[in-house]
Amino acid sequence: MKTKLLILFFSLIILSCNKAPQFSKINIVSYDMKVKYDTISRNLYVNSSILLEPLKQNNDKISLLFLSLAKINKICFMNKNAQFNTSYKFDKDTIFIDVPEQLQNNKKLSLYLEYKLSLDLISDKELLAVARSGKWCPLQYDNFSKWKIEIETPQNYIAYSSGDLIYSSIDNNHGYFIWENDYNLGVPLIITPKNHYSIIKKIIDNKEINFYFVNKNSIIVNKIIRELYNSFHFYNKLFGDYKHKQLSIFELDDSGTDAMSIETFIVVHDSLFLHTNDPLFGGNLWISHEIAHQWIGSGYTNTFNTKLSWFIEEGLTEYVRYMFIEDNYGKDSLNAVFKQYKNEFETQILNTNDDIPISSNSSSRVIYIKGPIIFHYVRQQIGDDNWKNFLRTLYNNYYGKVIDYEIFKSELSKYDPTGKVIKRMEELTEMKGILPIQF
Ligand SMILES: [Zn+2]
């Protein structure tokens, strides 16, 4: 029997902002969640206590992102041990919750929710919907919150999440795991049969790297470990010390998710392992990109839907990976990558619907091709040392914070006193139809 891997994940998406004005998007201060997975019914049962930020004005409704497939058994506000029942409505993957009149001026609102998710509805191919646009617990992206998740699994199952595992025990019937962390980008949860993964542990620069894989091909696994090792070391030197003790990387063999990275936690679909035989620089395109997100995006991120957010989040991450290629495989390899993507642009993007300016802030493939070219231009203009200082400043001053383009620009302008380079960079992001710089 094929062992089933269950993963719930949400990550970076572009959110459409068409909320009616009477609703208030509300940030979350802290979560306390108890999660139980029942293998027989394939249901995930969740009890969630959520401390909310005070309402900015008198709102009779609040909204949170939340998977509409959740079946809610109980929802109420809590205030000084008193319960206030409430009602709610889903609209796509947003939940609108009525705030009882007597709580509308309240400074400390907390929300209590009990719900279940049927994994049959969101497993396998449909899992992609959960990963990319659904949220298995209510959240906003641009917030900061402390998480505590207690997970109970059936015997012989094990749970993984990001952050610090502060407690785990396995008795005859169940496994218990408690994770705590500060997050700004969401909460991953993997529940899997105990022997599903083989684990390789590596120490790199005093950090513990755990690789959870199912692939039995040792040539492929060793290649990936090597790429992981080298790229982690490179970024650790480039940006400054990785801010966590641990990083875990999971191979997914039962979901539609490609690859994503949040603090301390990377998942990658095993179909991407097939790319490891790429003749260029040893392949493994995905891993050094996802590792770089531990310093960019997962490390700090700009608010979604603000100017040039995809350019910074993905274009810069991809360019930093190019710097790794240059360092590890040499200048020729860097030029080969630029050439390869130039060809990809001309044959697959030019004159198609994907040929849009990267300033239009979509997740189009063009971001990954033009973004690095533009950042390469910026680096050449301001000089290598300035460029590296700029990257270090972003990481060390803004780690765990949400930044927008204005902050990004003001940091960059310290190395561009006349403003000419930034002006040109902005112009280049607005172009379409041609590559910004010719190589
Ligand atoms: Zn990425």
Image (tube, grey):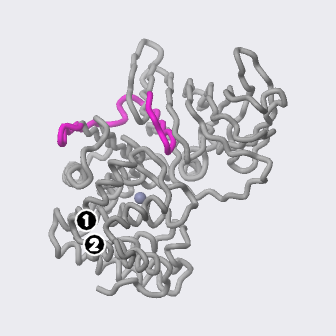
Q: Quadrant of residue 304?
A: bottom right
Quadrant of residue 421 in the image? bottom left
Residue 378 vertical placement versus 135 (above, below): below
Q: Position of residue 34 (x, y in %)?
A: 56, 24
Q: In the rendered structure, does residue 190 fall within the stretch colored magenta? A: yes
Q: Which residues are magenta?
A: 180-207
Whole-percent x, y for residue 289 in the image: 33, 58
Quadrant containing ligand 1 = bottom left
Would you say residue 351 is visible in this rendering?
Answer: yes
Q: Nearer the viewer, residue 172 or 201?
A: 201
Magenta includes 377?
Answer: no
Picture coordinates of residue 2, whole percent (x, y) = 44, 39
| 17 to 157, vertically: above or below | below
Front one among 394 and 6: 394
Mark 2 lies on residue = 382
Q: Of all residues shown, which one is farthest toward the top? A: 172
Helix, strand or loop at label 1? It is helix
**Residue farthest along the front direction in this orientation:** 417
Q: What residue type is disc 1 on?
A: Asn
Q: State the image quarter where residue 387 is shown.
A: bottom left
Is mark 2 in CB contact (under 8 Å) with mark 1?
Answer: yes
From the image, tell me which residue sits under label 1: 386
In-front residue for pair 76/394: 394
- Residue 222 visible to the viewer: no
Kindly identify the amino acid type of the residue bearing the numbered disc 2. Ile
Residue ID at (71%, 34%): 71
